[in-house]
Image (tube, rainbow, N blue to C red):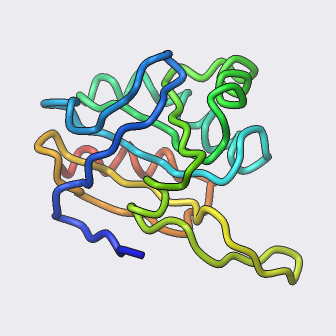
């Protein structure tokens, strides 16, 4: 599995979006992008993280930035999750794990003493030229969205 590094061009991908279209990264031009990878819709940490990005989305938008959440859940699951919490940005579905693996966020995790493979909660801040500005790995949810928004000022 590839380990993505900062300052390289973000790998392009196409994924279905909750807006009913196919999202393609390279088609976003002249905007910064926050891509956050999360384990599962409607679980406590993922819900908190998504709601935090949603609450900050007006500020994010004013900073010429768009936010997208990515997990392996289906589009149907994403649509329910988005509606339930009134998320004001799109979620992308990667059921085949292709983008999740391409970005190096699929790996061994442990919970209650059990080891398993899953999504390692991570966020990528991509600048308006398509280069990865900063990567957060093994994210702790509390105040994470706020620190990502603060980092946009350093692009």
Residue positioned 51% across, 35% down in the render: 92
Q: Indicate the quadrant where residue 31 lies.
A: top left
- Which of 21 and 71 lies nearest the eye of the viewer? 21
Residue positioned 26% across, 30% down in the render: 63
In the image as oriented, which residue stretches furthest toward the front?
Answer: 96
Q: How many marks?
A: 0
Spot occupied by residue 53 in the image (x, y as percentages of width and height): 52, 35
Q: Quadrant of the N terminus?
A: bottom left
Asked if residue 6 lies left or right of residue 103, the reply is left
Spot occupied by residue 107 in the image (x, y as percentages of width and height): 58, 74
| 146, above or below 90, in the image | below
Asked if residue 83 lies left or right of residue 91, the reply is right
| 140, above or below 131, in the image | below
Spot occupied by residue 79 in the image (x, y as percentages of width and height): 66, 22
Asked if residue 149 lies left or right of residue 92, the reply is left
- Which of 53 and 23 lies nearest the eye of the viewer? 23
Spot occupied by residue 18 in the image (x, y as percentages of width and height): 54, 22
Q: Indicate the quadrant where residue 123 lies.
A: bottom left
| 137, above or below 73, in the image | below
Residue positioned 66% across, 65% down in the render: 118
In the image as oriented, which residue stretches furthest toward the right?
Answer: 112
Residue positioned 36% across, 63% down in the render: 135
């Amino acid at each position: 599995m590839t380990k993505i590094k900062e300052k390289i061009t973000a790998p392009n991908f196409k994924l279905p979006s909750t807006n009913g279209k196919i999202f393609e990264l390279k088609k976003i031009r002249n905007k910064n992008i926050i891509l956050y990878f999360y384990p599962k819709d409607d679980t406590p940490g993922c819900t908190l993280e998504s709601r935090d990005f949603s609450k900050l989305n007006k500020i994010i938008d004013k900073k010429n930035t768009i936010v997208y959440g990515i997990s392996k859940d289906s589009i149907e699951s994403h649509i329910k999750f988005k509606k339930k919490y009134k998320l004001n940005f799109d979620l992308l579905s990667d059921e085949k794990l292709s983008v999740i693996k391409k970005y190096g966020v699929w790996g061994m995790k442990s919970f209650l003493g059990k080891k398993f493979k899953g999504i390692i909660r991570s966020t990528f801040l991509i600048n308006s030229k398509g280069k990865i500005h900063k990567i957060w790995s093994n994210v702790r949810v509390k105040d994470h969205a706020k620190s990502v928004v603060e980092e946009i000022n350093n692009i």
